[in-house]
Amino acid sequence: MGKNFEDIIKKAENYRVKYNNTFRDKIIEDMHQQISTILADVIQYKETNDLLGKIEKYVDLFLTSRIGGILVLTIMLSTVLWITLSGAGYISSLLGSFFEYIESGLRKFFDFLKIPELLTSFLIDGVYKSVAIVVAVMLPPMTIFFPLFTFLEDLGLLPRIALNMDKIFKSVGAHGNQSLTMMVGFGCNAAGVVSTRIIKSPKERLIAILTNNFMPCNGRWPLLIMISTVFLAPLVASNSNPLVGSIIASTALVLSVFIGLVFTLIISLGLSKFLKSLGSFYILEIPPFRKPNLLRIIYTSIIDRTVFVLARAVYMAIPAGIFVWIINHLNLSKTITNILDPFGKLFGLDGTIILSYIIALPANEVVIPALLMLYTNSKNFVEIEQLQSIYQILTVYGNWDWKTGICVMLFSILHNPCTTTILTIYKETQSLKWTIIATILPLVTAFSTLFIVYNFLLKHL
Amino acid sequence: MKKECENCQILKNIKNYTKIDYTIALVGNPNVGKSTLFNYLTGMNVRVGNWPGKTVSKIEGFFEFKTPDNKYVFKIIDLPGVYSIFSFTPEEEVTRNFLFLGSYDIALIVLDATNLEKNLILVFQTFDITSKVILALNLIDEAKRKGIIIDIEKLESKLKVPIIPIIASTGYNTNLLIYKALEIIQGKITITPAKYTQPPELEQIIEELKQEILEYYPELQNHPAIKWIILRILEGDKFIIEMIRKKAIKISSSQNIKTKSPDLLII
């Protein structure tokens, strides 16, 4: 019997070869024809006085045109980011004081239970505080960014922009929808990686996952803003001219996103050559304009994106908190930064910056607090609101100048994804290989770019 | 638009429902209002998980439907929105495999009245696999606004499957839709969906292979998807070929199998 079956399969194969594998095309072609015949008989079109439809058509034309689309996109994204960043600081400090309140309660409780001081310090300074700080810095920007973003998505605006971008992305072997996943990446790279599910074709999806990290997330914006405002803007404008200063600072920010974009496109091109075997197939469709559904927006943005990312972040923050606690308690930070210093100097950074990035593996948000902690020799993360005070600490204790600023900025845009994102990449690709590549690839890109920029350009200025 | 699904009842606490009478597989292209219908019927009272081994979301919900003499608990599975089931993408694979091998009582295909041409490929492909189908023609209000007039009776006579015009966002006519679906499930209406015709030479090859496959695996004789299976073999679909080689196709699959327990969920 079994042999008989193999014969049938062989026969089918012969037919397939004979017809040059065109069965499917033939069937589809036939099907289309029959569908057209059926529908010609069933559907009638009538002229209507449909004003709404006409408006929709013109709005569509505008949004899918190159200039209109990019204009709307820029305005929308900057507005969303501006609202996010200005609103988040406020909520963050509220959350911060709330967590401090809990902390004092916890200390009293531990005291009451007569728990040894070392253990109290480990649990509260190490575990609790790192979780609290990650939640306090990550939660507010996400709760503002994601509902706004999901609203635009639901409205049908974003898919039109994706269509606009398709040409650019297609030319590097990627998918137009990658522009959407990159925008989600502005909010959070982990969420950006999850959002690549909208790219159905395996090759293009993998490219979008591996390059999402080049879009600076919420956690990196404060650092980028700080450097462009206090290190780069004064280069051109004196401090007495705030308007020119802020224009320079914004230009620097836009430029940093642009650098991220350029790297995304270059790496995508490289990957698409490398991944040829994965196969690709896709249709890009514009959904109709819709009245956004508030419930769904809240559900998608809060449950699907915020809570889920935060849960992973907390999970990754605990070991990092323990790590910081240990190096602080054993007074290891000076030793480690001294060891890392010569390595950092190769790239225009220093040992403290490298260690800060190691500490900030679970969340990019804590890079500045970690830098300040290490430079000022504190036991805990240091949070300072005033940019000028941060500037003073960095220049006085850390010997930063504008060149360091540029190097850190580049490193921030190009370096490895945070552990939350890495974990998410693993969950999405189900592959250790791609997870490792997703981690190493940006890191190599960051160090090699910095090495070139610093040694061949900045050093000689 | 006043008529809503007055006989439908959203089930508040789905955990308490172990008894499920019938399962509906919700099929359709992306952006046709499939999820809107799903949310309307289930009140967003859903379980979300992943399909085994895939990063494709699996969404299912429950609702209750009353008829004059009985009431039924329905499980409804929102299959991933796809344009076809040629199985290029993970979504297409999930949908295709569920339609072919999953247990459900009826496939409810949601169509976009403003964009029928693109929808019908999936319709014909679904007809290939199962004959327990019903069509919901969604967005008829929008089609009317755009001046698209669809002769539903005529379309019905061509596809040979009941078509119910609905507006998923308001729930318009969903009552009739579920009622009709129930009639099909319970065998009160028998359906033989229209098949599209293949080029004659291909038809001949299919017939030839079909006889040989039936010799090897006679139980497939009355399988509704027999022709589809042959076509997959002809195309060299490894997954299907393996299933035939192992004779692993449940003969009654997709036909009247009642899922009694929701325990098989991956959450």
Image (cartoon, coloured by chain):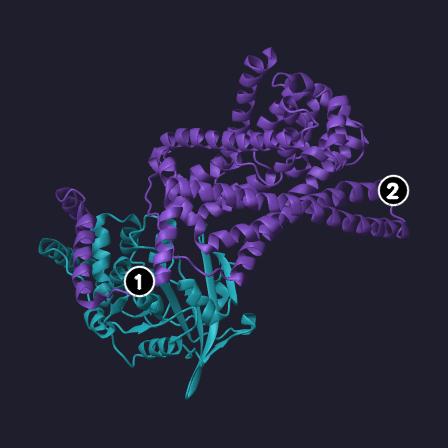
Q: Residue at x 35, y 38 (%)?
A: A167
Q: Is residue A39 above or below residue A121?
A: below
A345 over B70 or under it: above or below: above
The secondary structure type at the circle numbered 2 is helix
Count of numbered tags? 2
The mark closer to the camera, 2 or 1, is 1
Please tell me the numbered disc located at residue B114.
Answer: 1
User: Badge 2 sits on which subunit?
Assistant: A
Whether residue A312 is visible = no
Quadrant of residue A278 within the rendered picture: top left
* Quadrant hosting residue B138: bottom left
Find residue A149 and report its horizontal and vertical position in percent.
Answer: 53, 50
Q: Is residue A250 left or right of residue A270?
A: right
Residue linked to disc 2: A117
Which residue is drawn at the image coordinates 41% and 57% (left, top)? A289
Q: Residue furthest bottom?
A: B69
Q: Which chain, by letter, is purple?
A: A
- Point 65% across, 17% down: residue: A345
Q: Which chain is cyan?
A: B
Q: Position of residue B146 (x, y in %)?
A: 31, 64
- Say which element carries label 1: helix
Residue type, label 2:
Glu
Residue B102, picture quadrant = bottom left
Closer to us: B245 or B162: B162
